[in-house]
Structure formats: C-alpha cells, structure tokens
Amino acid sequence: MTGRINTLAIIGVGLIGGSLSLALKKHNAVGRVIGVGRSQANLDEALRLGVIDAIATLEQAAKADIIFVATPVAQMPRVFAELAPHLGATSILTDGGSTKQDVTAAARAALAERFSQFVPAHPIAGTEKTGAAAAFATLFEKRKTVICAEAETNPHAAGVVAAMWEKAGAEIHRMSAAEHDDVFAAVSHLPHLLAFALVDMLAEMPRSADYFNYAASGFRDFTRIAAGSPEMWRDISVANRAALRGQLGAYRARLDAFDRWLAVADTDAISAIEAGYSRASKARNAWQKHIEYGEPMPPLGGVSRDG
C-alpha cells in the first residue's frame, strides 16, 4: 500500500467515520471511500454530502485497503464476525471504539489467525451530534488518537493506521488496552455518566420545569455531553463497567467527603471545602493550558484528601 489509501471502507458513517473521510479527502490522502450502515437514509445523506463515494455491503467493505469500524462498540463483535470470512489478504481492519479490551477480545475471537490485520485504535474527538451530516473535516486536528496494538498486531498495519490518523490531523499516542480503559473510564466515561445522571435526576423531579427554566451556563457546560447518543454511551458504559465502577467509587468517596464537610460546616470543614475547590481549580487551569498551548502538566499530587 502506498502513502495514499486507495479504498477506505467506513462501517458506521456517523460523526467519527464521516469526519475521518472528509479529513482524508481534504488532504487528498484517499482515493475512494465506501460506506456501510444500518440506516439507508443516513447513507443516502452521506452520499449526497460527499462524505462517501459509494454505498457498499460488508462483504465489499472487507476487501478495502483499510476498513474502519465506527459503530457502537456492542455492534463490533457482529461486524467483525461478518467481515472475517471475506477479509482481504492485505486489508487492514481498525476501529474507533471508546473501549479497547472488549473490542480487542471480540476481534481476536472473530478473526482468529487473521487477528494480526487488526489495529485497535481510539480517536479522542467528538461532539454531541450524530450522523453523517454532523461530520466535518477538521474534527481530529490537534487531537489525540490512541493506538493499542497487541503483541500479534502487524507492525506495518499499525504504522499505516497511525499514518492515516496523522493525515487527518491527529497526534498519535500508544498504550495497552487495559491502560486505555482505565484512563478513559476516568476522563470520558465517568463524566458522561455523571452528566446523564444529573439531567435524568432533574427531569424526574416534581419541579423539573422550574429547574430547567432557570438553568444557565453552568448547567449547559456541565451537561452538554448528555445530549450524546444514548445507545453509544450505554454500550461504552457496559463494555467498560469494571473500570467505570472503580472510578465511580472514587468519585462517590470524594462526594461523601464534601457531604461530611457541608454537614459540619465548622472552620476546619470550610477550609477543607476551599482547599478541595482550589486543588480542582489549579488542576483544571493547568489542563486547559496543556490542551490549548501545549504547556506540560505540573505534578498534582495523587494523595487522597478525604479527611
């Protein structure tokens, strides 16, 4: 395969898959993009918008140079199983799933001796919008893509996938599937669970209309991600439930500490609340400078302060 992808197949032509296509097309890094999906209306829209060049079947997609599976993670075992008998000898299969241990296990089970052709990956980008119409060419610029190659992964295939994401504007990072799932349980899956839980809680309350009527920017910023796909986030939450429950337990412990301080509200408790807010503010500001300006993250401790 040359530096330019001859044929890219996208299975699940939504925000992520569609944006990858548009990014590669923008940089003339792909010759032809074919799309596979469950919704004919979405595929027709993708074709009309130029996100894909043709609609294909899974069997046709399996012969592409690169096959990018961008479905919800719960659908990936079925997709892998249906691709496996038709997978081209030199085709490279990769994914964009937000969990990696379950996806990698499903690929290993379905592909058997062809597992080396699979490159587990996760582009760290997105919005709350879904569907082909939500795709845009700059989604991955200055964003990270994590590649979680296994011992069996063909190094050439991993290099091709890394080059593809670099052409889309992403910065490549590498870690194991277990490390990936722990990290993203903390910084992605837990925040989504919390946002969904808060909106769901308020919506079920007798005075929900008042709450939503007076909600402003703080509520908007905290809950923006609760507008995302319930199906996708259901699948992610279940797939990574062990790591997610661990992070949820740590978060619950921190909430309990704040609850104890609020219950007492004496001088020490008030100081503890302020100290907690100060640590959080410092960490959040450092993270923003890291994301926006590339400044290194300072050491932030790591010692529990639940006293």
Image (spheres, helix red, strand yellow):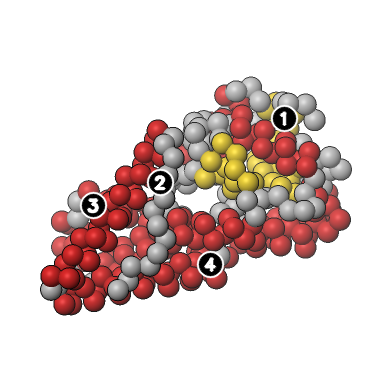
Q: Residue furthest left?
A: 266
Of the two numbered discs 2 and 1 on the same chain, state the one appearing first in sequence: 1
Q: Are marks 1 and 4 in contact (CB under 8 Å)?
A: no
Residue 59 makes an appearance in the image = no
Q: Nearer the viewer, residue 166 or 263?
A: 263
**What residue is shown at x 34% (from left), y 50% (from top)?**
283
Q: Nearer the viewer, mark 2 or mark 3?
A: 2
Give x and y (percent) for residue 157: 76, 41
Please determine whether, in this image, residue 52 is positioned above or below residue 274.
above
Q: Nearer the viewer, mark 3 or mark 4?
A: 4
Residue position for label 2:
298
Say what secondary structure mark 4 lies in.
helix
Q: Would you call the spot at circle 3 few (<14 residues within 10 Å), some (14-19), or many (20 or more)? A: few
Give x and y (percent) for residue 84: 80, 53
**What residue is shown at x 58% (from left), y 31% (from top)?**
168
Label 3 sits on what residue type? Gly
Q: Nearer the viewer, residue 141 or 270?
A: 270
Work out how far the residue at label 2 is from the one at label 3, CA to CA, in angstroms. 26 Å
Residue 276 makes an appearance in the image = yes
Q: For the N terminus, which image quadrant?
A: top right
Say what secondary structure mark 1 lies in.
strand
Label 4 sits on what residue type? Ala
Of the two numbered discs 1 and 4 on the same chain, state the one appearing first in sequence: 1
Q: What is the quadrant of residue 111 in the picture?
A: bottom right
Mark identifier at residue 218? 3
Q: Are marks 1 and 3 in contact (CB under 8 Å)?
A: no
Residue position for label 1:
5
Mark identifier at residue 56? none
Give x and y (percent) for residue 76: 66, 57
Mark identifier at residue 243? 4
